[in-house]
Each structure stands twice: as structure tokens, then as C-alpha cells.
Amino acid sequence: MQKDYKLRESVEFQQVFKRNKSLRDQDWLILYRPNNLDTARLGTAVSKKNVRKAVQRNRIKRIIRETFRKNREAMDAVDIVVLVRQGISEKSNRQLNTTINAQWQKLAR
């Protein structure tokens, strides 16, 4: 994913955490807020508390990034932070793709 589409600075994450809207389901908590750019940007927060093994955390982040890349064009200019809930590491890649794509579709509306 290109640098233009990532939230990298702590300040950028904090702005989303402070003033946000959210989408929720049993696996994901997606926080977002409008930005002054012409594209959507993504940040992920997959904690050790919710996903113990690094391999699983990396798998989940790869799925988030790939689905975001495919759906980015349909979204408005927003900064997005994706948080995961406990138990997500037991889900298959197909299940994760389905649920996160549903959240991206809601955000694109």
C-alpha cells in the first residue's frame, strides 16, 4: 500500500480516536473521520491482547490492507482506524474477508 493511503503518525491516529464515527460488528470496530485530502487513508490497531500470536496479527492486517485497497476508490476522503475484537484469530480468511468487505460497503455509502 502506498504511503499516501496510510496513517503513520501518532497524531493522525489520535485525531481519529478523538473525533470519530464508528461502524461495529462482532469482529471489527472501525473508527473514521473526514479528512482534508482527496483520498481515504487507513490505520490498523491489532493488539496483542486480542490476537496473541504475531503470525495471526500479521494475517489479519494483510486482510485489512488488501480489502481496503480494493474498496478505497468507492470511499470518500476519510481517515480510518480498524480495531479488532477478541476471538477474531479463530476466523478463516474467507470469513474475515466477508465481514470486513461488508463494513467497507457501509462506509462507502
Image (cartoon, rainbow, N blue to C red):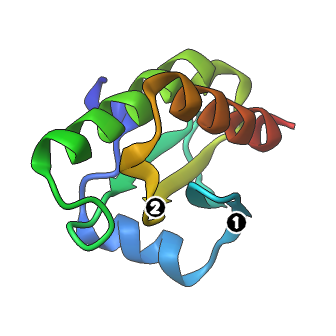
Q: Position of residue 86 (x, y in %)?
A: 43, 66
Q: Position of residue 35 (x, y in %)?
A: 59, 54
Question: 55 and 68: which one is in front?
Answer: 55
Q: Is residue 88 left or right of residue 33?
A: left
Q: Position of residue 50 (x, y in %)?
A: 33, 67
Marks 1, 2: nearer the viewer: 2
> Crowdedness of circle 2 by 10 Å Cα count: few (<14), some, many (20+)?
some
Q: Quadrant of residue 58?
A: top left
Instruction: Work out which residue is located at the far top of the displayed protein and give it.
Output: 70
Label 1 with label 2: CB-CB less than 8 Å: no
Q: Which comes before the other along the chain, label 1 or label 2?
A: 1
Question: 75 and 58: which one is in front?
Answer: 58
Residue drawn at x 44%, y 26% is: 93
Residue 16, relative to residue 73: is it above or below? below
**Helix, strand or loop at disc 2?**
strand
Reading the image, the residue beneath label 2 is: 83
Residue drawn at x 77%, y 32% is: 105
Instruction: Work out which residue is located at the far left of the displayed protein and give it.
Output: 54
**Helix, strand or loop at disc 1?**
strand
> Crowdedness of circle 1 by 10 Å Cα count: few (<14), some, many (20+)?
few
Q: Amino acid at mark 1?
A: Ser
Residue drawn at x 61%, y 49% is: 78
> How many angstroms separate mark 1 from mark 2 (CA)?
11 Å
Quarter of the image for the N terminus: give it.
top left
Instruction: Work out which residue is located at the far right of the displayed protein and give it.
Output: 109
Q: Is residue 66 left or right of residue 34?
A: left
Reading the image, the residue beneath label 1 is: 22
Question: 100 and 81: which one is in front?
Answer: 100
Q: Position of residue 90 (x, y in %)?
A: 40, 45
Q: Is residue 18 left or right of residue 101?
A: left
